[in-house]
Structure formats: C-alpha cells, structure tokens
Image (cartoon, rainbow, N blue to C red):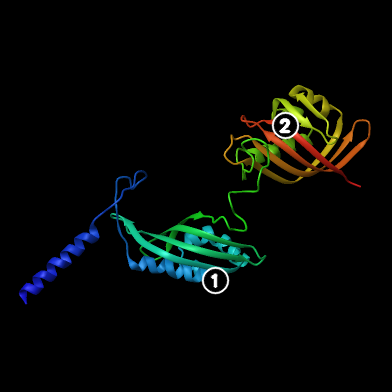
Amino acid sequence: MKKLVLVGAIVASVFSASAQQTAGKYFSGPNAGKGFQLGSEKSSQIVLDAVKAYNANDSEKELSYYSEEMQKKTGDFNKKWHAYAKKLNDVPYAILPIKVAGSTDEIVMLQSTEDREAIDGSKQTMKLFELFKVNKEGKIVDFNQYSSIPSTNEFGKTSGGRFYSKGETNGRAFQFSNRGEVDAIEKFNKAYNALDVETVLSFFADKVKITDFDGNKMVIEKKDLRQLMNDFKSVEWKISGIVPIKIANTDPVSGVIVTSTEKRVAKDGSVWNKSLVEMFQFDLNGKISGLDQFSQEIK
C-alpha cells in the first residue's frame, strides 16, 4: 500500500513539474525573455462557447464572453457584422491554451475553417488562425485574427484579373497597390477644384505622357500644365471611384483608375461637362507620369 502511495506521489510530482515547464520565448515587450506554459481547459471552453454564439449569429450572446472594455471597443462592429451575415459556420479543428510564465491571463490559439454567407448573397470561405486572450475572470480581453483566402473565393482575394501583353508580364494577375495613390488623388482633387495650380503641379512628374479624350498622344512638361488651368474660371470635379492597381510580380509602378464627372467653365463662358474614366500612372517616385482619358458627354 505504501509502495502504491509512493508511486502515486512520484507520478503526481512528475506531472506537476511537467505542467510548470516552459517552452518558446517572447522576444520583445514587457514579457521579453519569458517562456510559455500550458493554459487551462476553462479558457478553451470560453472561446468555444463564444464561437458557438458566433455561429448562431447571436451578437449579444457572443459579446457576453468579452470584457466590458472589449465590448465598448468592438461592440458596434460586432453587431453590424452579425446584421450583415445570413449564415456563419466556424468549424474549429485545433485549439491550444497557453500562458506566459507567471501571468494570470491565458492565450487561446484556435485554428478553424469558416464559411460565411451574407444577406446580399455574397459567399466566402476563410482558413483562420486566431489568438484570444482570456483574463482570470474568464472574459476575452483581446483578439487577433490571421487568415488564408482560398483561390475559389468569390471575393476578398489579394490578386485577380489578367493582364494581356506581348512581354513577360502577359497573363499576370492584378493586385491592389497601396503607396499613397488614393490619398494623392483626393488631395489633387481638392486642389484642382480650388484652382490651386502650384499644389496640383506638385503631384506630377517633370514630364507627363498624356492620351487625351480624342486619342491625341503627347508628352507635356509639368510647367506647361499651368497654362491649361489658367483658362479655367471654375471647375467641379466629382470623383465617384478610385481603384489603385499594379501588375503582380513587377516593380511598384501603379495605375489608378478614377471615375468621375467634371464640369469646367472657361473664362470665355464656354462650359465643358462630361462623365470621365481616367487612368493615372504613378511612377517609382509616387508622381503622376502618365494619363489616359475617356469621356462621355453629359446631356
């Protein structure tokens, strides 16, 4: 009997020591140098219960698993998301609770596949890796999500379409570009409507290749653009869309498609009023170096 008790004590001791062992390490921040330990099943269950409420499209129930601060931070978005969703099906296939040695908070890592269908009919599948931080009161206090987007998705992909050319870029997909083009077009729009010539010129390269509305091709120096604007009494350029794109696996040069309407009143009283589609080319320095224009008369 004593032998069995002793063996039980040794086994318990081994498992207790194992539970306290650490692995991995934080490399920065207040926990730099600290390792990780296994967390609790309680934290895992809290996350799984939140997922269950999410799948039921029950925003109020899901938010009940979050701390008050998180509810204030994410509540509006959560409610809007559930109002937009028709069906949600997040299927976990792996969950692991861990914690930083000495911490009372736990981090629950969840891998899953989620199918989404919106009330407008849009459908999407996401492969997810999520990090939930659960405090000692059993509330989720932080959340981060990382996703992989299957190529079969209806939307949300990072590239798409196809570029046709005779060169090595033939057949390549397009990607969204994000080098400040949208901000530049918006500021250009504001300055143009204000007839602020010097600010408008600041967005252009020294030389600009232009194909105008009539198919005329020309190369204009930046200083010559000033004269074009001097003929205007007023302009009203209303933008309806800005789409910055680039060809995949090429340099950062981008093309920005801008849809708009524009009404120009010249100093001689003549009026120019058209619906426009324009392609602005931004060079490696982020300046407008090319412009192709298409128009339709507004009657």
Asked if marks 1 and 2 touch (Cβ < 8 Å), the reply is no
Q: Amino acid at mark 1?
A: Asp
Dot 2, crowdedness within 10 Å: few (<14), some or many (≥20)?
A: many
Q: Which quadrant of the figure has residue 284?
A: top right
**Is 35 on the left or on the right of 165, as rendered?**
left
Tell me residue 82's x, y (percent).
Answer: 58, 66
Tell me residue 44's x, y (percent).
Answer: 38, 66
The residue indicated by pointer 1 is: 58
The residue indicated by pointer 2 is: 290
Using the image, determine if residue 262 lies above or below residue 222: below
Labels 1 and 2: the sequence-earlier one: 1
Tell me residue 263's x, y (percent).
Answer: 85, 40
Q: Which quadrant of the figure has residue 111?
A: bottom left
Q: Amino acid at mark 2?
A: Gly
Spatial CA span between label 1 and label 2? 50 Å
Front one among 278 and 237: 278
